[in-house]
Image (cartoon, helix red, strand yellow):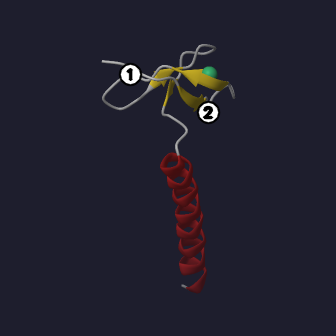
């Protein structure tokens, strides 16, 4: 089985670069701090952005709800 290096970005130390993915999740370890990373794909980028937006919206709604009571 052949694996092609994919672009990765470490959320802990900020390392950016190419690394060889490991099946089945295409994960890799950061060469600087050893943190588990997922490939920087279109879905991954937008998935995280969507998660942050929904989390912010949830917090805002939560605060607004308790201010009404
Ligand atoms: Zn790192």
Vertical side of 10 occupied by 31: above or below: above
Of the 4 image quadrants, the one containing the C terminus is bottom right
Of the 4 image quadrants, the one containing the N terminus is top left
Vertical side of 24 occupied by 19: above or below: above
**Is the shortest distance between ligand 1 and the CB of mark 2 under 8 Å?**
yes
Q: Residue at x 40, y 21 (%)?
A: 3
Q: Nearer the viewer, residue 11 or 18?
A: 18
* Res. 9 image quadrant: top right
* Res. 22 image quadrant: top left
Residue 24 lies left or right of residue 31; in this view the side is left
Coordinates of residue 18 in the picture (x, y in percent): 59, 23
Q: Residue 22 carries which label?
A: 1
Q: Mark 2 points at which residue?
A: 11
Label 1 sits on a secondary structure element that is: loop
Look at the numbered discs 2 and 1 and tell me whether their residues touch, using CB distance below 8 Å: no
Picture quarter with ligand 1: top right
Coordinates of residue 5 in the picture (x, y in percent): 51, 23
Label 2 sits on a secondary structure element that is: loop
Residue 1 lies left or right of residue 29; in this view the side is left
Q: Nearer the viewer, residue 43 or 67?
A: 43
Residue 26 lies left or right of residue 66; in this view the side is left
């Amino acid at each position: 089985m052949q694996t092609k290096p994919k672009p990765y970005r470490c959320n802990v130390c900020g390392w950016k670069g190419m690394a060889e993915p490991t099946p089945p999740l295409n994960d890799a370890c950061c060469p600087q701090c050893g943190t588990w990373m997922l490939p920087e794909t279109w879905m991954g980028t937008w998935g995280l952005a969507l998660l942050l937006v929904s989390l912010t919206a949830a917090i805002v709604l939560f605060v607004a709800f308790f201010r009404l009571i």
